Amino acid sequence: QSLAKRLHVAAEVEAERSEHEKFKPAINTNSDRILEQSDKFAGKDFYERQMEALEKKQQKMAVAVLPVECSFTPEVAGPWAEKVAQEREGETFLARIERLAYRDRDQQNESRECLKEHYYSQFTFKPAINKISQQLGEKRTVEDMTKNTRKQERIQALRKTEEEKQARDCTFRPLLAADHRKSKGDASVRGSRE
């Protein structure tokens, strides 16, 4: 209903505005002809057509909200169904959670691995790789390739040598306020820095 009210208010505002404005758009004659020939739109203005569309939309929504009874019931039969029913007969809520969260997933993983092994067992080709290629293509884990620990170790070693070099080359050691307070009582330190 709020949309209907807004459309009604918009139509009134548009009618008022059209009286005062100088610009009067010309509607294409084909559009008028289509509206006149159409059974659906004949004799209705824009506002009436919008209200009709809104009513249809609301009717569809009302039908969609009605509870629908499911007519399909799967036929569960066979020896495996009976076996599963017997296994799950006295199953508690927590046991069901355990089964769904862990045991079923583990069974799926096992069957997936079994299928994978079976599939790849048909491919018997094992390429012969010479020693140089083996050395070039050394086995590395994904973590080694993403973290690049060797590069980080080299960077740290370079930083350390650069800091040591800077400490050797830079002989200027200013007397800082914190150092000054610590060394007030020690005249030898004070004399050597001054």
Image: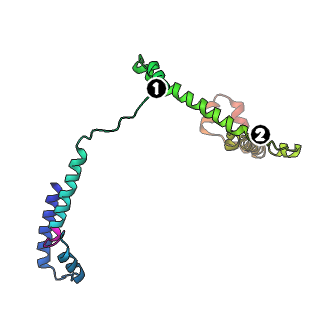
Residue 12 in picture, x, y percent from top left = 11, 68
Circle number at residue 81: 1
Instruction: Place residue 146 in its image quadrant.
Output: top right
Q: Tell which residue pokes out farthest to the top in this image.
A: 90
Residue at screen point 82% across, 44% down? 127
Answer with left or right where residue 34 lies relative to residue 137: left
Which stretch appears magenta?
Answer: 40-47
Residue 134 in picture, x, y percent from top left = 84, 43
Which quarter of the image is occupied by the N terminus? bottom left
**Would you say the magenta stretch is mainly helix, strand or loop?**
loop
The answer to whether residue 116 shows anywhere in this view is yes
Answer with left or right where residue 59 lies relative to residue 80: left
Q: Which of marks 1 and 2 is in front?
A: 1
Q: How far apart are marks 1 and 2 (CA)?
A: 47 Å
Answer with left or right where residue 114 lies relative to residue 163: left
Residue 18 in picture, x, y percent from top left = 14, 76
Q: Earlier in the sequence, mark 1 or mark 2?
A: 1
Is 41 in the magenta? yes
Check the image and report above or below for 77 versus 91.
below
40 or 150: nearer the eye?
40
Residue 3 in picture, x, y percent from top left = 18, 57
Instruction: Indicate the secondary structure of the residue bearing disc 1.
Output: helix
Instruction: Place residue 176 in its image quadrant.
Output: top right
Answer with left or right where residue 134 lies relative to residue 8: right
Q: Tell which residue pokes out farthest to the front in this image.
A: 78
The answer to whether residue 28 shows anywhere in this view is no
Amino acid type of disc 1? Ala
Circle number at residue 139: 2
Q: Tell which residue pokes out farthest to the right in this image.
A: 131
Instruction: Indicate the secondary structure of the residue bearing disc 2.
Output: loop
